[in-house]
Image (spheres, helix red, strand yellow):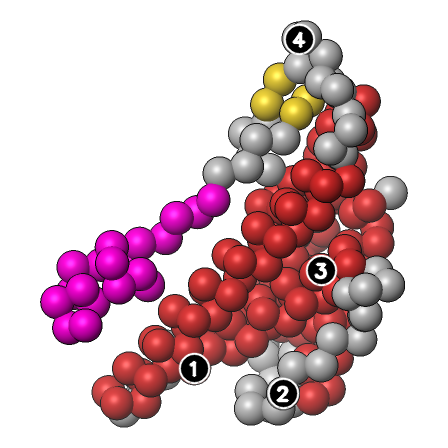
Amino acid sequence: MFSKKANEIFIDAIIQFKEVGSLVEPFVNKYDKNQDLISHLLFRKCWIDAVQWSYEDIIRDPCIKPLDALKLKRKIDASNQDRTDTVEYIDSYFLEKYKDVKPRVDATINSESPAWAIDRLSILALKIYHMRAESVRQDATQSHRNACEIKLNILFEQRQDLSLAIDNLLIDISNGDKYMKVYKQMKMYNDSELNPVLRKNK
């Protein structure tokens, strides 16, 4: 099933990111996009999420200097745009994959595209990784570890449910029972023509 492959790639990306241990090292994708495009995109997607997770931790430091916070906010904005672009590339992959499938006359549309569901699966992989670490953190209290263990089990259940939903959605699309209709995010705040503040300062 697709979700099994995706979850394995997400875990791999997180582990490799943690092994690198730096936010300034250049990103290297272990999957060649010309040989395995979807694996390439999934690995990239989760790496972006892992970087942004670190950014979000750092910017919440109450002692962070205002200028450093501003610089980091710019990085978070750029990361968000990169994340959105990558999700849309993943949807483009599925649009191409299922382009010859003729939807049934009673086919329905899903509330979200496959890639945006996969986006949530990537975030879940990061939540599981960090909650697992908290559940065994030796400098934490036992009550903290117990509480995190309970949350971890809920996250596992969420991943199982979401994985099944994604697999079923892809099966339904491949059978023509559902059809894809993708809306570009059309984010306005990074566009110098659409953001009045940026437009004023051009």
| Separation of marks 4 and 3 at Cα, in angstroms | 31 Å
- Which badge, 2 or 1, is on the more N-terminal residue? 2
Q: Which residue is at 43% across, 82% downward? A: 58
| Separation of marks 2 and 1 at Cα, in angstroms | 19 Å
Q: Nearer the viewer, mark 4 or mark 1?
A: 4
State whether residue 150 appears in this view: no
- Which badge, 1 or 3, is on the more N-terminal residue? 3
Mark drawn on residue 26: 2
Left of 76 or right of it: where is 116? right
- Please tell me how crowded label 1 is: few (under 14), some (14-19), or many (20+) other residues with Cα within 10 Å: some
Amino acid type at mark 4: Asp
Name the one closer to the observer, 3 or 92: 92
Image quadrant containing the N terminus: top right
Name the one closer to the observer, 149 or 162: 162
Q: Which residues are magenta?
A: 184-202
Is residue 138 magenta-colored? no
- Tell me the SS state at disc 1: helix
Left of 61 or right of it: where is 168? right
| Separation of marks 1 and 3 at Cα, in angstroms | 25 Å
Residue receiving disc 4: 106
Mark drawn on residue 42: 3
Is the C-beta separation of discs 4 and 1 under 8 Å?
no
- Please tell me how crowded label 4 is: few (under 14), some (14-19), or many (20+) other residues with Cα within 10 Å: few
- Tell me the SS state at disc 4: loop
Amino acid type at mark 2: Pro
Is residue 200 magenta-colored? yes
- Please tell me how crowded label 2 is: few (under 14), some (14-19), or many (20+) other residues with Cα within 10 Å: few
Classify 92 as above or below 201.
above
Image coords of residue 106 (percent x, y): 66, 8
| Separation of marks 3 and 2 at Cα, in angstroms | 18 Å
